[in-house]
Image (cartoon, grey):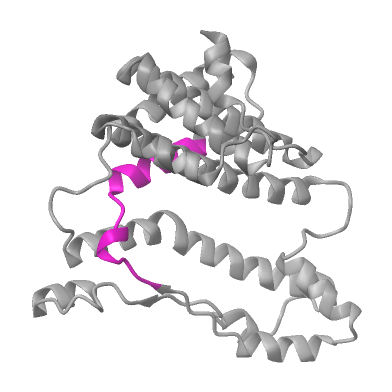
């Protein structure tokens, strides 16, 4: 059983950067948990079908000498029964969702590492990194202050009917991310409890349908966008603005920026929910 579980969780590439080892450990662990769920709920045959296809695809990706050709892979998939196709598609979809979640967690992990490291070097791509680069290239505080006042970043929120993810799945995916972060420095007993909870969430993801029985309405799309606003975007936007101002203060030693800079909001949200749906007036108002 342990050898079988290890097979699905063996997903590391040929080379791994030292700082990315935690990401690969998370991916291996989540893959193993997913393999356990498939075997327990769908059976050994379903697990073997998924695992054999995963191994064949991985072999081809790494250009191994005995790797199957694309035509051979397609021929193998075309030979699947309808039930095998459904389980395999579901397995790969959920696997990639878990990988994406682990990558998001790793970005948080790397940002924390930069903030707590003894080095004074800022994280590449961060607000502090940008301000330092501007200072080193000879720009003064006044130049940067004027540039900040001209900033107008406006992400536009949209929710195409085929991309309006169910809030249940969004909540479960967020729970996976929280649990991965919480287990980072947890003591052994608490870590085991967190991993047991993670296994339960992976199982819930497996048994939760991604497909809506009815076509999502504009109100469904609005609910999805509200979820992102309430749980992610509003706080993230405020933190990004604060980080920008702190980086400006610290890199250019300006003390507290002028009130006009402190009051400037460089990030605002646009909305296109329902904009391409030609909805009734009541649904249009809901999108607004």
Residue 159 pos. (x, y %):
31, 66
Residue under the point 33% across and 16% down: 43
Where is residue 76 drawn, in percent x and y? 42, 35
Above-or-below relation of 103 to 176: below
Q: In the rendered view, would you say 242 is above or below 201?
A: below
**Nearest to the observer: residue 245 or residue 177:** 177
From where the camera sits, is residue 282 visible? yes
Residue at the spot 53% in from the left edge and 17% down from the top edge: 5
Left-right relation of 28 to 77: right
Is residue 158 part of the magenta span, yes or no?
yes
Identify the residue shown where x is 52% and y is 29%: 31
Q: Is residue 179 above or below residue 228?
A: above
Residue 198 shows in the view: no
Q: Is residue 252 left or right of residue 193?
A: right
* Residue plotted at (65% across, 32% down): 66
Q: Which residues are magenta?
A: 157-178
> So how many labels did they put on this image?
0
Image side of residue 173 versus residue 254, left or right: left
In this rendering, position of residue 215 left or right of residue 33? left
Instruction: Place residue 50 in its image quadrant.
Output: top left
Q: Quadrant of residue 89?
A: top left
Considering every residue shown, the one lying at the far top of the view is 1
Q: Nearer the viewer, residue 262 or 7?
A: 7
Residue 258, picture quadrant = bottom right
Relative vertical location of residue 147 with respect to residue 232 in this rendering, above or below: below
Quarter in which the C terminus is drawn: bottom left
Q: Could you tell me residue 49's position as x and y percent?
A: 41, 25
Query: Could you tell me what secondary structure mostly forms the magenta stretch?
Result: helix
Q: Nearer the viewer, residue 141 or 14?
A: 14
Q: Position of residue 68 (x, y in %)?
A: 57, 37
In the image, residue 62 lies in the stretch drawn in magenta: no
């Amino acid at each position: 059983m342990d050898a079988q579980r290890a097979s699905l969780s063996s997903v590391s590439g040929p080379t791994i950067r030292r700082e990315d080892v935690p990401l690969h450990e998370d991916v291996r662990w989540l893959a193993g948990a997913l393999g356990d769920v498939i075997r327990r709920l769908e059976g050994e045959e379903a697990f073997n079908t998924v695992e054999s296809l995963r191994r064949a695809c991985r072999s081809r990706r790494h250009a191994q000498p005995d790797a199957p050709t694309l035509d051979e892979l397609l021929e193998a998939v075309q030979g699947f029964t309808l039930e095998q196709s459904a389980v395999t598609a579901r397995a790969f979809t959920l696997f990639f969702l878990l990988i994406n979640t682990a990558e998001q967690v790793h970005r948080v992990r790397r940002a924390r590492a930069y903030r707590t490291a003894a080095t004074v070097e800022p994280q590449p791509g961060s607000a502090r990194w940008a301000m330092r680069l501007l200072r080193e290239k000879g720009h003064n505080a006044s130049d940067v202050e004027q540039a900040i006042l001209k900033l107008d970043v406006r992400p536009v929120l949209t929710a195409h009917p085929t991309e309006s993810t169910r809030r249940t799945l969004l909540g479960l995916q967020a729970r996976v991310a929280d649990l991965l972060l919480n287990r980072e420095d947890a003591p052994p007993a608490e870590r085991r409890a967190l991993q047991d909870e993670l296994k339960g969430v992976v199982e819930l993801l497996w048994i939760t349908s991604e497909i809506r029985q009815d076509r999502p309405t504009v109100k469904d799309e609005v609910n999805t966008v509200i979820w992102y606003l309430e749980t992610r975007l509003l706080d993230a936007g405020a933190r990004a603005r604060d980080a920008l101002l702190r980086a400006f203060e610290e890199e250019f030693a300006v003390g507290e920026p002028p009130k006009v800079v402190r009051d400037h909001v460089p990030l605002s949200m646009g909305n296109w929910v329902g904009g391409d749906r030609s909805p009734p007036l009541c649904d249009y108002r809901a999108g607004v």
